[in-house]
Image (cartoon, helix red, strand yellow):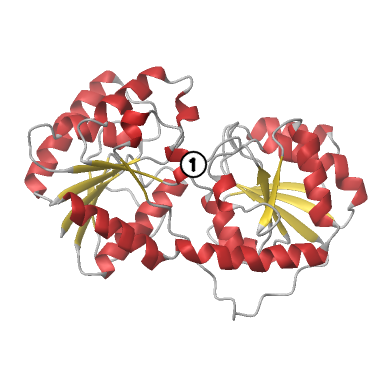
Amino acid sequence: MKLLFAIKSLDCTRGGAEKVLANVTAMFAAHGHEVSILTFDKKDGKSIYPLHDKVSRLSLGIGHAEQRTTLREAIKRITSLRRTVKEQKPDAVIAFMHSMFVPMAFALIGTGVPVIASEHIVPQYYKNRKIQFMLLAASSFLVKGMTVLSTSVRALYPPFIQKRMSVIPNPVYVANPQTKTPQKPERKVLLNVGRLDPQKDQKTLIAAFARIANDFPNWDLKIIGEGSLRPDLESQIHSLNLSERISLPGTTDNMTEEYEAASLFAMPSRFESFGLVTAEAMAYNVPVIGFADCPGTNEIIQNQENGLLVSGENRVQSFADGLARLMKDSQLRHKMGKAAHKSIERYSDEHVFKAWENLIKQIL
């Protein structure tokens, strides 16, 4: 098959959807399909995530991919999308994120080229973005299918959109359990990975850690990521006098090292479409903790089995209590870590690839 994948940018954002697109396109290319990726990035840009050497790029260079789209840019992008896709003549277009599949759906009206929209967020994201959600709803009638990352997230959408949705989870690299795990450092690491953003709610994590920090003097909190909340989080850490115990090192290209060094993974997000970093931590035998009312997280973590889900009421104290339970019990962490690794096997590359391939073939 000749497939054209599309996403707003690969050069500006170190996000889960961008990482998944790089992985999925590599799988299709490795299986002999002709694969291209189209973005709005500048023509001389470089993808943050490495791409398969048989995957080609089409960079339209319209507007600033990291900024809000203007009406003029939107019109120009739709025109350029239509022209480019007609020139490429793919069997199907798979567009990731509403920022790409909405304009793509409108651009290809009447062309006969089927569009598959891949949604990577939950409806709660659109709570204060009514126009965006209206455009998403309208575009759902123009695409041949729409993917979502879990059954629980699918259930949150209106029925008329649900009917067009297929559940395909993100692929997760499953670490080899036979590989010798490096010796954990004397100081234990409580790890969090994610964009520094209100959705990810690192403020709650920091506040919860502060409540129990004195009880666990050999534990440190490490938050990997960047975002608009960095100044607020730095101020919060300083005010709690925990600058020696909580670090914000930014992003890294070596997540394997971070997961292997971690003794516990914390995901305090308010909502997730699919907790990719949570699943990645679990693949490295790291026990995890999250909120029971967080979509995405609560589908990956089976409470008391491969991790711990705590109540979303009184968030800070609930999270602090859950952290304390796991931090004081190494045997429980080990048991949950082993179960976590085993439960992630269902998200293997081959499983996810087959789901994508079957969906595309069915639509074609």
In this image, 89 relative to 296: left or right? left
- The amino acid at mark 1 is Ser
Viewer-proximal residue among 4 and 348: 348
Q: Residue at x 83, y 40 (%)?
A: 210
- The residue tagged 1 is 152
Q: How many marks?
A: 1
Q: Where the N terminus falls, by quadrant?
A: bottom left
**Coordinates of residue 349 in the picture (x, y in percent):** 40, 65
Viewer-proximal residue among 220 and 324: 324
Q: Hey, which quadrant is residue 183 in on the image? A: bottom right
Which residue appears farthest toward the right when viewing the image? 215
Q: Is residue 316 above or below residue 13?
A: above
Q: Residue at x 7, y 37 (%)?
A: 111
In this image, 80 relative to 351: left or right? left
Residue 19: tell me if it is visible: yes
Q: Residue at x 59, y 45 (%)?
A: 298
